[in-house]
Amino acid sequence: MSEHLINQGGIQQDLVYMAAHELKSPVTVLKAYVQMMSLKMNKAGQTDYLGITEKMDIQLDKLLNIIADLQDVTQITSGSLNYHFAELNIHESLRNCTDVLKLANPEVEIEFSLCSPDPVIKADKDRIEQVITNLTGNALKYSGSNKYLRITSTIENGNLKVCVGDKGEGISPEKLPYVFERFFRAGSADENKLPGLGLGLFICKEIISGHHGEIGVNSKLNEGSEFWFSLPLRVINQF
Ligand SMILES: Nc1ncnc2c1ncn2[C@@H]1O[C@H](COP(=O)(O)OP(=O)(O)O)[C@@H](O)[C@H]1O
Ligand SMILES: [Mg+2]
């Protein structure tokens, strides 16, 4: 690649980062106004339109997630994604993330099978919860009508392994090797109904590799998928 094109790539990255940064504040302010509006409507007993403000809030969260993904990708590309490591009870994180998911999607059934006692690792809580949110969110998004998730944690060979399984549409063997690539979407019949940039799993992979861990997937078309990640327990003192 010529130096000119490299610079142009850098300018584009900067532009995406800055545009995402600038979009974030008005959207955050808008979200605060929507929340204020629903509080005021609630207080005044005007509950007719609360469903609409709730839907606005959900859409604004989606927009904020897209903005955050764009910022993360530009940071990954420029090597400036930083981590703040501290002791983390990952089971608490699994519960936090699934509580939020359940709140927005009460119809989803989630089964847990977690190892005991709760493993404590050294990790960046926000980033690990971002991975869990992405994997559980995908499991639900690509689950079709079977809204069932199975979450397990096990200790294997000095690693903590977390699996998120679903009984959804699955991924074909030809597409499976590419799901962690930037912008890759395996494309189902319903693709148009399921918007996305194809960045979530790329970001997850980067975060897990930033924790010296591994991430992977087993999947069968029309039967379901199992996304997993593992994090080392023993080398925690190296961080
Ligand atoms: N649990 C899952 N079941 C079936 N397909 C999945 C699942 N998770 C991810 N995929 C496929 O991998 C692609 C990439 O996922 P992701 O990076 O999260 O991007 P996005 O959800 O924005 O499309 C998705 O478009 C989808 O085709
Ligand atoms: Mg996704």
Image (cartoon, rainbow, N blue to C red):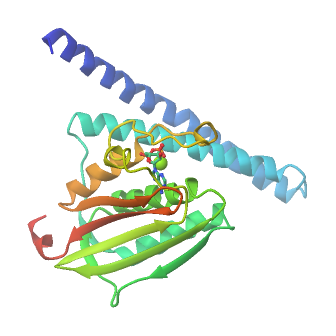
**Which residue is pictured at 41% across the width and 47% down the height?**
200
Residue 54 relative to residue 124: left or right: right
Residue 5 relative to residue 14: left or right: left
Residue 227 relative to residue 24: left or right: left
Instruction: Tell me where residue 75 sits by quadrant.
Output: top left
Picture layout, residue 24 above or below residue 231: above
Asked if residue 28 shows in the view, the reply is: no
Residue 131 on image: x %, y %: 38, 58
**Which residue is pictured at 50% across the width and 54% down the height?**
138
Residue 201 relative to residue 112: left or right: left
**Which residue is pictured at 31% across the width and 25% down the height?**
13
Image quadrant in which the C terminus is located: bottom left
Residue 223 on image: x %, y %: 52, 63
Image quadrant in which the N terminus is located: top left
Asked if residue 53 shows in the view, the reply is: yes
**Which residue is pictured at 34% across the width and 52% down the height?**
204
Residue 170 on image: x %, y %: 49, 56
Picture layout, residue 43 above or below residue 114: above
